Each structure stands twice: as structure tokens, then as C-alpha cells.
Amino acid sequence: MIVEGSIFPLARANVDTDQIIPTRFLGSLDLRGLGRECFSGLPGIDRLYAVHPDATIVAAGENFGAGSSREHAVWALQGRGFRAAIAPSFARIFEENAYNNGFVVCAVPPDAIDAVLAARSARIDVAAESILLDDGRTVEFKLDPLRKEFVLGGGFLAYMEAQIPEIRAWEAAKS
Amino acid sequence: MTAERTLFAKVWDAHRVRDLPGNNALIFIDRTVVYELLGPPAIEQIETRYGGALYDPRRLVAVNDHVVPAKDSSTAEQAQVLRTWARKRGVLLYDVGENGICHVLVPERGLVVPGSTVVCSDSHTCTLGAFGAFAFGVGSTALAGAMLSGATIVARPKVMRVFVRSRLQGGATAKDLALGVVARLGFKGGTGYVLEFAGDCIAALSMEERMTLCNMAIEAGATTGICAVDEVTISYMRGREFSPGGEAFERAAAAWRTLVADDGAAYDAELRIDAGELVPTVTWGTNPGQSAPLEGIVPHDAEPAALAYMELEPGTPLRSIALDQAFIGSCTNARIGDLRAAAAVLAGRKVAIPTIVTPGSQAVKRQAEREGLHDVFQDAGALWTHATCGACPGLSTGVLAPGMRCISSTNRNFPGRMGAGGRVHLASPVVVAASAVMGRIASPSELEAPVLA
């Protein structure tokens, strides 16, 4: 799986879930409009969209996706056309939600993020856990070995379904 | 057979179905909480892809909590999906009228068992760690996974002991302790950890105060917080709607008493706090880690972007900051003890700004009314509402307009959290109440004597 595209540079830490998709957009069963509101909680976002209209890879500072459990944050990013995010660190629930939706999260070494933010584009080889920047530099990242399979092939719920017999047996043995 | 274990390790071991690749394990989930805002995507996946199959409907609880009653047709549809599904699948439902914020309602009904595991598609599920439970927020798809399979995948967190000695004093509350923990760790300093709270200060806290503390573990990025079980826990559990009765309760309590860390258990990290040094605290910035003493100033090294959003200058005394609204509510601070404390400040006084008091559950509301607290709030000129998350996530009953500044007993001061362009200062219920009276950030100690009728 290769994700290739231009970088959307958010040179700030702690981009929280309310900035990715404000709570007021969660009050609906209809998830189709989320992409239009992606990052609408982030001051000055319109300028950035104007400069990077076709970006597909978010680059950001540490603790990206902090805060709420809303999977809508990932759905909003995907709805806007983003396919991956690169940051020194991600909040736990956001990262899990990303994995479960096939949205690629690359936690890179903190000293590598400036190069990513400065790059125009990147090519992410998900299986190889490696990013090639347009200036020729390579940045490595590490994916969770189990959840990586959900990114590459989907199937989180199918995986959970397959565990049910063992879970039932475990519960029966315990009681 | 084994070495000394942390409390978290005991709960983990008791629920580990098996280890999975990487650092992961399959963890059995005792209780799954589903609510109207972020539950429907999970319900839809289970209904459309798995014919509505649930591992065990008796382990589920459905609560209408975030926007109650619905504020428009769109949120009414969400509530309708939840109640229709719960009725069809035999899931215990707390609907409009007996609703509450799920993290308030679930414990008050006795639905969180000490030492159990709980998931919910809300990050503040960590609140329930107060009961020695491993309780944590997950996304809607992971919630669907737990509904379907009775388990979830968890990357084993490290365990940080947060040792709090001495006693809260000088007006400092559990909220100030929570803000103090987040300030010390920073907004991401707890990431990858469970915060295991210990020490004589924690032992002296009520269950409500422990819930306030655990509630904000997520604000340091932690997976959750957890407190040891003691007689305070057991006494809280006694007589709850879903607690066992009689002999069965005593047997359960005997098992719960083992839910403490072993002496000599090894931790991955430790944070030590002297509660005697904590003071009433207010946030000045745009994440819960950005706070300062109420009697202090906006720090000179404050993050410029946060100050720009908050329209504050470094060096500004916090007590000089004028406010447009005060809010007491949320899963952090809307339990009966919080309302009693706020009412004690407001008794015989008048608020100077719009002030909204939103109880954490309808049960809390009714208890408050039995005690006459609703009269205290309303005599002071505050608005006394029904239970809901409401203003905290900027959904209803107190949403801010751009530029409005609100002091709030809640847990998040993110940009736009309580309404696009709104500014939020987090504080304890008593500081919110005092600030409501003064129309600026204020301490209860500076209020003039109340005019008692």
C-alpha cells in the first residue's frame, strides 16, 4: 500500500479533535458532510486550504488528535480527501480510530518532523513503514503489527467476530 | 507465583483473554455503554453487517445523555435510533426523563462494578476508574467490536503511580488536584499510561471527588485513571440499584477489597504531589494543561497562539479577567457534592452574568431539589436546567457566541469547545460560583457577606 501526495503542513502541536471536527457537527446521523468541515475548528484554516488545495497527507506537531473519542475526526479527514497523517505522536483513541478506518498514521521521530513539514510531497510505503520525501530524504516510522493489518486490509470487525468463540470459551471457563 | 502487582495489572490479568501480536491483548469487556451522539455509527454497523448480533445484551447500557432533550430533528433522530435499537435488542435504556450524563448515571445506578472493564465511545469514560475499574474511551468502530464480541483490543499501557500525599486545603478541591496533575504531566505527558492514583490524599477523597480526578486523566493523554478500592468505594456501592444485596453484597465486597496495589509493586513511572501545596486553579489557555493559580497571573512564557485565541496578555492577573457566562455542569463536576458546594457560595448572593447550572443526571437533579439547592441557584438568578452534557461540548443549553468568555466547571477549554470562537476557563464549581457573582474570575474568599433572607 502506497500513499502518495502533497503535504498539508500544520506546524503546531496538540491539534485536538474539536479542531479537526467541532462537536456541533456530530449531531447528525448523516456523516457525508463531515469532509467539508474538516479542520473548521482551527483558526486560519481557510488560508492553508487555499495554499494547499489538493494536499492528501497531513503533517503536524506532537499529540495530533488529542481529546475526544469521536471517530468523526478520522471520517472528516477522509471526507476531505486526506489519506494519512504524519506527526511525532498521536493521541491513543485517534490513532486506534485511524487504524480501524484504514487511515495511515505515521509516528515519526520528533527530530524528523521539521523535514516533513517543509516537504512539498511525500510517498508513504505503508508495508515498509517508510516515507520518501520529495527532497529525497527518507523517514522511518513504526506501525502496530496487529493493527497494521487493519490498515492494509481492513477488517477490524471481522477480526473481532472471529474471536467470539474463544471469548465465549474464556468467559465460560472463568465463571 | 507472581511478583507484586499494580492494581491495574490485577484488573488487566483478570480480563485478558489472550495476548495478541505486538504489545496487544484481547481484553474482555464487562460493560459497554452506548449513547446517542457517537453510538449510532456502531449500532448501524452491527445492525447492517451482523444482523444486530450482540455478545450479551445484558452487558450493554444505553443512555440518552449528550443532547437531552434533542434540540432539533437531527439530534432527535440520533436519540430515536438509540431507543429503537435498545428496545429491539433488549438493552437497558435510560431515556429522556431518567437520563443523565452516562459517566454520572452509570455509577449512581451501580452499573460499574469495582475491578470491572468498561468501554464507551466517549473519552471521559476514564471517570469510572474511580471504582478500581479499567474504564476507557474508544471510537465508534471499536465500540461496535465490543458490542459484537464482548471484548476489545488494547495495547497494554504502562502504569504511572500518581502518589498524592497530605490533604487538600485552603479552598483547593478535587478539580484543582485534577488540573494540577494535568499541568504537571502536560497535555500529552500521560499518553501511553494508566494513571494509578495512590496516597493518603486519594484515600481521603469521596467517590465523587475520585470521579472528578479520574475524569481528567484523558486530559493528560492517559488511557485512563484508576483508584484502589477501599471502604469508601464499598460504602458507595451498597444499596445501589444494580448492586447485589445481602450476603451476595458482602461476598462481592470481600473480593473488591483485594483491588489494591500490592506493596512493592513496580511502576513504569511515578509522579509525586503534595496536596497541601495545591491551590485553587484556573486555566488561561486552550488545553487543560495550561493553568495557573487563581491568585496568580497569565504566565510570561505562555504559548502565544493560546493567548491570541483567548485574547489575553502575559502577566494579566487571572482575577481581573471579565466574564460573559458561568457554567456548572458536566461529567467532571455536576454531582450532588459539586452542586452543594456551588450552592453554598451562591446562597444569599446574586450572579452578575448569565449562569447556567446543569445537574449531571436527573437523579442528581431530584436530590438537589429535595435539598432546596434549586431554590438557592434560582434565587441567585442562575438558570437551573435538566440534566445533559449540554453546554460543555457546545451542543445545547448554554452554547457560546464567538468572543464570549465563560468560566466552567467542565474538562475541556479547546478552541471552540463550548461554541465556535468561544473562550473557556476551567475551574472548580466553587470558583465558578464566586466568579458568577463577581462577573470576573474570582475566589469565594473575596465575596462580601451574603444577604440572607
Image (spheres, rainbow, N blue to C red):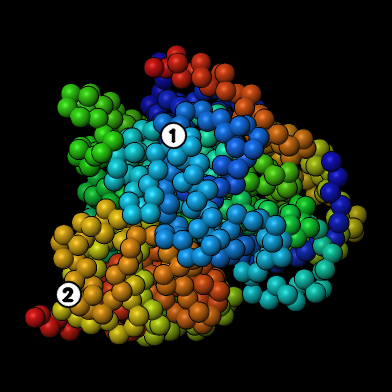
Looking at numbered disc 1 in the image, what kind of residue is underneath it?
Gly
Give the CA distance from mark 1 to mark 2.
45 Å
Instruction: Mark 1: give few (<14), some (14-19) or many (20+) Cα within 10 Å.
Output: few
Read off the chain for label 2.
B
Q: Which mark is residue A41?
A: none
Give how far across and how far down residue B302 sits, in percent. Answer: 52, 74
Q: Tag 2's secondary structure?
A: loop
Q: Can residue A56 be seen in the rendering of this structure?
A: yes
Residue at 45% across, 68% down: B396
Q: Is disc 2 on the same chain as disc 1? A: yes
Residue at 82% across, 68% down: A53
Q: Is residue A74 left or right of residue B393?
A: right
Q: Which residue is mark 1?
A: B90
Looking at numbered disc 2 in the image, what kind of residue is underneath it?
Ala
Nearest the camera: B444 or A159? A159
Residue at 76% across, 52% down: A84
Residue at 23% across, 57% down: B366
Q: Tags 1 and 2 in contact by the CB under 8 Å rule?
A: no
Please determine whether, in this image, residue B437 is positioned above or below residue B338.
below
Q: Is residue B346 left or right of residue A77?
A: left
Instruction: Mark 2: give few (<14), some (14-19) or many (20+) Cα within 10 Å.
Output: some
Q: Which residue is mark 2?
A: B347
